[in-house]
Every structure is written in C-alpha cells, then in structure tokens.
Image (cartoon, coloured by chain):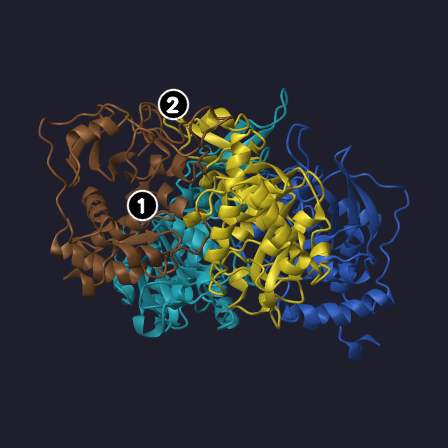
Chain colours: A brown, B blue, C cyan, D yellow
Amino acid sequence: MADYSRGELLATVLADTVGYARCITVGAVSPIPAAAALLVRETAAKPVDVIILGSTRHFPFTDGGREVFDFAGRGRIDVFFLGGGQIDGAANINLVGAGPWDAPKPRFPGSFGSAYLYYLVPRVILFREEHSRRVLVPKVDFVSAPGSSPPEVHRPGGPAALVTGKARFAFDKERRRFRLVSIHPGHDLDEIVAETGFDFDHDADVPATPAPTDAQLAILRSVAREELADTYPEFVRDQLAGPATAA
Amino acid sequence: MADYSRGELLATVLADTVGYARCITVGAVSPIPAAAALLVRETAAKPVDVIILGSTRHFPFTDGGREVFDFAGRGRIDVFFLGGGQIDGAANINLVGAGPWDAPKPRFPGSFGSAYLYYLVPRVILFREEHSRRVLVPKVDFVSAPGSSPPEVHRPGGPAALVTGKARFAFDKERRRFRLVSIHPGHDLDEIVAETGFDFDHDADVPATPAPTDAQLAILRSVAREELADTYPEFVRDQLAGPATAA
Amino acid sequence: MTRTTLFQDLDALLEPIGDGASIVVPTETNGVAMAATRALIRKGVKDLTLVGGPTSGLQVDLLIGAGVVSTIECAAVSLGEFGIGPRFRAAAEAGRLTIRETTCPAVHAALQAGEKGNPFMPLRGIVGSDLLERRPDWRVIDNPFASEGTHDPIVLLPAITPDFALFHAALADVHGNVWVGRRREIMTMAHAAGRALVTVEGIYDGDLLADETMAPGTLPALYVEGLSVQEKGSWPLGFADAYPTDAPHMRAYVAAAKSEEGFARYLDEFVLNRAAAA
Amino acid sequence: MTRTTLFQDLDALLEPIGDGASIVVPTETNGVAMAATRALIRKGVKDLTLVGGPTSGLQVDLLIGAGVVSTIECAAVSLGEFGIGPRFRAAAEAGRLTIRETTCPAVHAALQAGEKGNPFMPLRGIVGSDLLERRPDWRVIDNPFASEGTHDPIVLLPAITPDFALFHAALADVHGNVWVGRRREIMTMAHAAGRALVTVEGIYDGDLLADETMAPGTLPALYVEGLSVQEKGSWPLGFADAYPTDAPHMRAYVAAAKSEEGFARYLDEFVLNRAAAA
C-alpha cells in the first residue's frame, strides 16, 4: 500500500468500471476520473476519445457549452462520471441539498448536467470519495436524477457502478440495487456495512480491490501526469508520484 | 423619364413603402430592394441597419444561416422584401409552382424563407417586376405563405405593399385586399386593370408614381453604387447611372 | 481525437455513401463540394436523398439530372442569378422527383434538433400555408405555454439526421479538424449527420483546435469521417474569398441543361470524362 | 451597423440595469465581468434575477451576499476547486433566495429558444426528477412523434429571454463588434438577451467582421448595447489564456465569506472602496 497514492488506486478502480468505450467524458473538477479516463485510453485495444471539461487540451468542442450535451444526446458519449451530495441504494442522486428543499442543511451547489447526462450516457460511473452514512443514504432528500426510470421514459443511459474511497459497487439494473464488488485495501465488510446508509447485495466473501499494477502506475505517472498538469497541477503534484519517487 | 433607369425608379418606389424602420433586410438576388434599403438608410432621421443576404459587407451575422431567421423571430427585422411566382389579391404568395403541385407548369424554385418571414417581419414588401395575369392571379395554386392569418395564429408580420414594374399597391389588412396607390410613368389604369388577375381597390383618379428626386438619384449613384458593386456588379453597371452620365 | 483516414482520394472519401443514403449539403457558394459531387455521379450511386442547407443549386441539379438523387428536401433549388435549376424543374414537372417542400428556417431548426438528439423542434410561421399539406410528418400542436384558454397553434418539425454531411472547406489539419470559418451552418450539418465527408482547399500546418484564433471556426475531428484535398473543389461555384463563381460556365450549364440531350453532353464533357472534369 | 455608445466607463455601461432586471452571465472563467460586477454592487441596484450560463460562482455569490440578487436560475453555484459559494449556501439555507432549480442543458436549450423567439424548446432527461416539482413553469408532454400508441414523455422548457447579457471578452472593435472566440455560449446569451453589456481586455484595431479569421468568433455589434475597456476585467477569476484565477484571493474570499461579517469586510476592501477595487 505504500507504493501508490490513494488517487492512483481510485483511478485504477474507476478505469476498471469503464468497460468498452469509444468516448469517455469527464466533468469539471474531477481529477481522479480524468486520470482514469486517460488510463483506459492508453490500455484499450481500440481508440478511445477522452473529453475533459475544464481542460483546454482535452476539450475538442467549438459550439459553446451546449455541444457536450448535444453530443451526449446523440449517443456519442459512452461513459461519464457523476458525484452526488447524497446517493441512495436505488442510485438516485441528489446534488441540491440535504433536508427540506426550502430549508436545506447543507445546500449543495446544484444539479449541474446530471438531470440530463444520467439519462443519456449509457454507462454513468458514480464516484464519491467520502463513504459515510451522510452521503450514502437510504433515500435521497431531492432527486436531481433518478437511478432508473419507467420503461416509457427515453433513457438509453444510467448508473453502472459506484466507486467510493472504501469500495466498489456495481448497479444491478434489474433489481435496482447495488452489489458490492470489492473492498479497497485497509477496509472490511463490517466497516462498509456500518458506513453505508442503504442496503446492498454482497457475497459472503467480498474480494479485496486489486492494487494498481506496475503498468497502470507507469501510465498514470507518465501520460496522465503530463496531460493533466495544466488542468490539475495540485492533483498531479500530490497524487501522481513522479518517476523519481515511483521506484 | 430619360433621366433615370427603371431600377432607379423602382428603388425609390420601394424605399417609399418602407416607412419607419430600424433594420431592413434584403434577400439574395435582390438588387433593386438592396438599393432601396440603402436609400432609406441614407435619408432616414434615425440610424437604420441594412442587412443584405448574399453580400459580405452588409451581412453582420456569425451564427450560420439560421441567425437571420432567429433575428427575425425576435422581432429585430422591421422590413423584408419577398417575391412570388404567383401573388393573389389576398396577398397569398406562391413560390412553389403553377398548376397542380404534383405536375406543376412551371415549377418555381421553392418557398425559401417565405413561410416564416412573411409571418414574423412586421412590414413585408412584395416586389415583382413582371406585372401580368400570369403572376398576379385570382388565387395562387400553392400557398407558400398566406397574406393573412386567423387571430389565434402568432403573426406579428405580414404584407404591407406590392410593387411591380407598373404600379404600387398598399395592402389593407382589414379588408385583406390591395389598393392601388400609384401608377408608374408610362402606364395607365386601363393597362393595370387589364394586366392584373385579381380585383383591387382604387380611386377614380390614381396618381402617377413620382419620379426619383435629384437627391434620391444622387444617393443611388454614389452610396448605393459603391456599396453594391461587389454583390451586384451588373446591376450597378446597367442600372445605377454613374456620376458621369447622371448630369 | 480522430479515427479519420486522412486525406484520401475522392473515391475513397465517397466510399461510405451507398444507394439510398441521405446527405446534407450547404447552400450555393457556401462550400459546395462540386468535385466530390462529380465523383459521386461517376460512382454510380442511386436513390440518394439530398437535404439542402437550406437551399441548393447546381449540385442538386446535376445529381437530379444524372439520376443519382430521387428525393430532395430543399427550401429552394436556385442557381441564383442564373435562374432555376433546369434539371430540377424538368424532373419536378414530370413528377420524377420526390420533393419534401420546406422553408429555410425549418431546415435549420430540424438540423438543430438533429444535432441535439431531440425528436423535434418548434417553429413559428408555416401555419395556414400549403407546406403543411405536403408535410404530413410535421405536426401542429397548441403551444402549451399560451395563456390559459387561448389557442396558439405552432408547428413541430421532426429532427433531420442525415447519414452524411458533404461539403467543401478552406482548411483541414492532420488531426482531422476542419476550418469552416464563418459558414457555421456547416457545423450544424456535420453535428446532425455525425459523419462529415469533407473536401478542402488545403492543409493547415498545425492543430486548428489548439489555435484560439482558428478554433472558433473549426469543426472538430470528432465529426469528420473522411477528408480529401481538392483545390478549387467548389468549381464552377465560387468559394469564399478564394475564387468567384465561374459565370460563363454557369451560363453554359443552364443553356445545356435545358434539354436532356444537352445535359447528357455536359455530363460527358465535365463529369464522366475524368481528365476534363478533375 | 451599431448605435453603441462606444467604450464607456463602468457606471455608464451599467446605467441601463435597473431594479428587478434579469441578467444572463457566463460560467466561471469563461468571461465573467467581475470588474463590472463590483460596479453593479456599488451602483446599489436590487432584486436582480441572475441566469447562470449555465453555472455561476464567485460572481453570483458576491451579488447574493451584497443583496443585489434575489432570484437565480443556475444549474449550480460553485467556485470549482474552492468549493461551493458561501453566501449562496447561507442564503439558500436561510430561505432568503429564490432558486429556480435547473440543469445545464436546460439553460442552454431555453436560451436557444430565447434567441429564436421560440416559445419553448424540448429537452430529453429530467422526467422523474424532483426538478420538475420545483419548475411548475416546465411542461411534460407526450412526444407527438412517438410511434402510434406509445407514451413518450418529454419536457418542454419555456424560452429564457433575459433583459441583459453581461460578460467579459478579449477584444472589441470601434464598430461595437466583440470577439468572444471559442466561448460561443456567450453568443447565444447575447442573442437571447438582445442587449449585451460587455467589458473587454482591449480594442481590436480594425473591423472584426471584415476579417474572415476573426469573424467566426465575433458577436456582431447588432446585439451590443454597451462596451467598456477593463484590463483584467475578470479578476480574481481567470480569463482564457490571458491570466489564471488568482487562487490565493479565491481562498481568502471563501474564508472571509463564510460569515456575514467576513463578507462585509471583503466588500469594504475589494468592492466598495473604489481605489482598492479597480
């Protein structure tokens, strides 16, 4: 565990959840998903486009802020990452506020593009480092975007996975529940159950999340480090160990 | 009559129909309306924007071909000029074809923007040089855009006037009929009645269309000549007599 | 950021276009890929649907005359000062062409719906015109935002999502980005189609998206499926400031295309004979 | 082509904005007119509605804290890496702010409806979220283009037509044209508002619309009501490649604005004291 940073571990976990993708898009202020997307691009068998909002280098659009949503609306984004002030066991997400809407405590920033992208992007990966009953709640207080929709609703997309600082879950679309896939090194099932506010499925024996491989770390510390330096200088400095310290 | 060209006369007639305007827009392949618009701009008490489709110099838009329609949709274009393969006495216009739709004779080019701009632009000036029963028909065979609409239809705009090579008409919105305003020099009421396929209102004594004033001719032969040279070189050469020949 | 096979010849560029494909093209002198249009005729494809953006001219007239296009959705077919397209007129009068009547802003709006993946777009105007009779695919609804108790009919246009956008532009870079400059409707067309086939006058030395001066007029490579360098690729139409329309050629075309025989001779001389047409 | 009174001072620029006006502004670092925002606070206007395009940050937080803005329509209020806006959070939690909940593409789409004079625009997504409960002005209809007998709910958003667009751009020319470059959502905002109030870093020597390289990124003077040259006009936010966000200042702001007293001290020092704020 001393050989990689927390950011490096989580980037590899996120990368593992992506699956086959031609285009991965990452929202603003999301350094770990950005690193994960570049990791996928570097290891995929086929070309992968990586679009990073907030980056100049990885932002290929020229038709204003709407273009990324138009692009998603046409089914051209395969994977997107979303967070949430609250996330519940049915994968509903709340980016608006805890408590009553007109007297929230705390108020969150707002729904951003979630009420659209969660419906349109085939595989949305939920990512929130904080793994606590404050975040992972039985039922969100405000649905910025629901985890699933009735069959008549146009919804080619939705949640595929949830990654936190402690564990990785998969979302079962049929059962509309999360299933615990693996627990990150340093944590155990009792802790996950204790810190998760919703019920989830799990085997009796839950595997540990594998540590990053040398090949993954090499990519994060070269390609990702170089390409994210402009957009996320502090993340790169603090989390993606440089070649000198990686040995 | 020897002192001005047909184009100069018609430009002054069109300019007279414009009235108060902050923005006049002229469609493609419309040299005489373009000259009229510049004439209005040069003689108006307040600033007038002139937009000429097909011109580089007089085309201030940068959001693609849709922007002129968006601009009109916001009520920002006060005057537009439209033609028609057929025009009837209720100011319906046909840019599609004479005869049955599926076997027209002749087929016209198509409706262009008429089915939108005729509704949205407050004052649309109909302009067609040919004044004949072939063009000015009792009832158009295809309505590209109607001359008027029921009250529930969103229609801030519509026809204000009709100018031909022989006469000038005003459109009476209440009666939904044209009224003959003046007859161009060289023509008379009998000829107008004979060559017009629809009924129209007129006084017993219809005035002659006034000849262009020296001031109008001076503007057409200087400002309009200069500003339209790029877009309409042949019109400028043939119709807007240069300073040398104007004396 | 691209999987474009860069800078192909015309035959390779047009390879994806099969019988029955729909193609959106820009309006006369705004970047019409005429060299590619001639190659399309030589390719022998048929039953194409051509969407004018929003009007068309020589390009669609040639394609109709050559039997390549069987359906058009154009707000008008006009060669500007040279008149109506003679082959369009002949085909329309003979009932040999399926014409989806429309109006300029309807094409723009439906392409915008297409670029968004929206099923439709509203548009003012149109109500009460005979266009509605000819467009059973258009709907009129009561504007749901009208004041209580009032009736405010408004047209909804279904999205247009052509199979391809085909156009000519000034520059492309080796990454596959294309500079269309001020002709931004081309960008909407490419977005709506998703697959742009592009001819360009020349190659830009650098990355168009990395230059903040060039980027605003650049179509990203994401939408570009094929590129071919074709100097004077719009001839005999004009292109931007680069060259004007070849007026004598246009007049000769209109004169020739008045008859089927004359048109056939034009095709032979300027389209089918590669040596003369290039 | 313009009636702009060119290159005014900030007070003259903001003169048209009265109590209760609605203003659309760009998202953080995309051209936020911070110098003008400070002048707006000094002007003492109130009850403004601020539409974020589609999110906002420091600008709206300052305006809320200073009691200038009473209604917002923003998909989020965030200072990015510096966290949520402290004054926004405090006002929201105390119920002192009218919040029109929305989502990024809904703002974009409603502004596009606004620029067209369309009454509404459809948008996918949203159905089944609690946003709908908070937006009684939004409608859900059955998509009229769905297959016969199927039920396909889709949201219609009413157009947003703000009174003003207020933003900072790189360049303007003496004709009143403004170069916004790649930040094209600013163009949509200006179209939707019809009246743009603009601060710029500098003056372009020439006619932006006459230069085919600059024209694609140029907002025409037709939409521009006022202009003021403000070097570093986005400070402490970053602007394009010209300057980065002043991170120490942002951290100091967030620390100060956690309390009303701290915010009042910040206002005194950086906004109300003209000498220090310019």
Picture coordinates of residue A84, whole percent (x, y)? 36, 36
Q: Chain of mark 1?
A: A
Give me the C-alpha separation between circle 1 and circle 2.
Answer: 26 Å
Above/below status of D97 relative to B127:
above
**Total number of numbered labels?**
2
Type of amino acid at the residue the image marks with label 1: Ile
| Label 1: which secondary element | loop
Between A141 and A173, the one nearer to me in the picture: A141
Name the mark on residue D87.
none
In the image as oriented, which residue stretches furthest toward the right?
A: B205
Q: Residues within 10 Å of mark 1 (few under 14, many from 20)?
A: many
Can you say whether D135 is above or below D159 in the image?
Answer: above
x and y percent of residue C221 in the render? 34, 59
Badge 2 is on which residue?
D151
Residue on which disc 1 sits = A77
User: B61 or A77, which is in the foreground?
Assistant: A77
Neighbour class for label 2 at 10 Å: few (<14), some, many (≥20)?
Answer: some
Q: Percent from the top left, x then y, of residue B210?
A: 86, 57
Amino acid under disc 2: His
Position of D111 with respect to A75 (left or right) is right
Q: Establish whether labels 1 and 2 are both on one chain.
A: no
Image position, residue D77 (x, y; %)? 49, 42
User: What residue do we see at 56% from left, 70% from top?
Assistant: D211
Quick check: D145 left or right of D168?
left
B59 relative position to A62: left or right: right
Taking the spot 37% from the left edge, 51% from the top edge, the residue there is C69
Q: Is residue C178 visible?
A: yes
